[in-house]
Amino acid sequence: DAPPVNIGWDSHKPVEKAPDSLVRPGDGPDGNYPMRARFEKMIREAQISITGAIEKIDGKATFQEDCWTRANGGGGMSRVLKDGAVFEKAGVNLSVVYGSMPQEALQAATERGVDRAKGMAPGERVPFFACGLSCVMHPRNPHCPTMHFNYRYFETDGGVWWFGGGTDITPSYLNEDDMRHFHGTYKGVCDKHDPEFYPKFKAWADKYFIISHRNETRGLGGIFFDDLNDREPEKLFEFAKDAVNSVVPAYGPIIEAHKDDPFTEREKEWQQMRRGRYVEFNLVYDRGTVFGLKTGGRIESILMSLPETARWEYNNQPEPGSPEAEIMDAFKHARDWV
């Protein structure tokens, strides 16, 4: 069956090079929806700078880019690195989507209880615009954490708009200095814009990334926010810009510090089991995955976040007092890192 939207699974047309902008001409800086083009430009620049920095850290592999467009407007650019010296797989995807969706599908992609179908009659489809940059990086070394970020801007044709996003980290082994650095970097970003942001968005991440059927978190959090429109859009745009541009300062030094750490086969197996948990969260609970599947998104881009390999051992229980047990305690009991 076709997805419940008007863009369709087969609406993606591969192109050799993406156009200068994937936003419709009438939505440009001088058009009716100027934030659409501004946000796309900002995340395009971030995609280039982040992938360039990760290539330097890896030292071997480079990102390969796929581009596509849609006849009704929008499209995307996926940049994926694989078989690197440091990273098994890393992807940074940009997408611009024009579509319409049932009100209940839009609800599933936003914070529960928030009405984003304002001005629409009951049962009427909601025309929307969405633009975002998402990333997952899976390193080889079990002592190097996986990192994920997503920053996005939504707008309905009914005039409702909001920002969402965040950056979070998923280590297989606990290094408290690394966590203080990562969380400290994002606390600095948040404090620059609003001292209430970090405690609020850190707690939101701890809650959002719970694997409910395991009663544990996917990782050790970071910041997460959604449906953010409580102040001028310009202020929230600048916050999102600072946050996405802090990905490399927050994450890069951790990878540089541990990419050459020695590790055992058992530690690699534990990393694979934690990647299994990563898969469980992304396919069952992740809001971005749900949105992509409900809007007829490009499947290769939606599932880019999954690791190339993962492991499930029956009823695995870490040995008490082991490093694996130590981090499991952190997955089950949220901590303050800064």
Image (cartoon, helix red, strand yellow):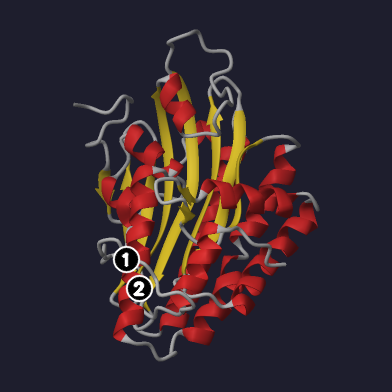
Res 244 label:
none
Residue situated in front as seen by the camera: 16 or 146: 146
Q: Residue at x 36, y 72 (%)?
A: 271
* In this view, 277 is above or below 99: below
Res 316 label:
1
Q: Residue at x 31, y 34 (%)?
A: 71
* In this view, 42 is above or below 144: above
Mark 1 is surrounded, within 10 Å at the Cα level, by few (under 14), some (14 to 19) or many (20 or more) other residues, namely: few
Q: Position of residue 196 (x, y in %)?
A: 78, 49
Amino acid carrying label 1: it is Asn
Quarter the C terminus occupies: bottom right
Q: Say whether residue 170 is visible.
A: no
Res 270 label:
2
Amino acid carrying label 2: it is Trp
Quarter the N terminus occupies: top left
Residue situated in front as seen by the camera: 140 or 155: 140
Give SS at disc 2.
helix
Q: Position of residue 8 (x, y in %)?
A: 27, 31
Q: Residue at x 46, y 79 (%)?
A: 322
Residue situated in front as seen by the camera: 298 or 86: 86
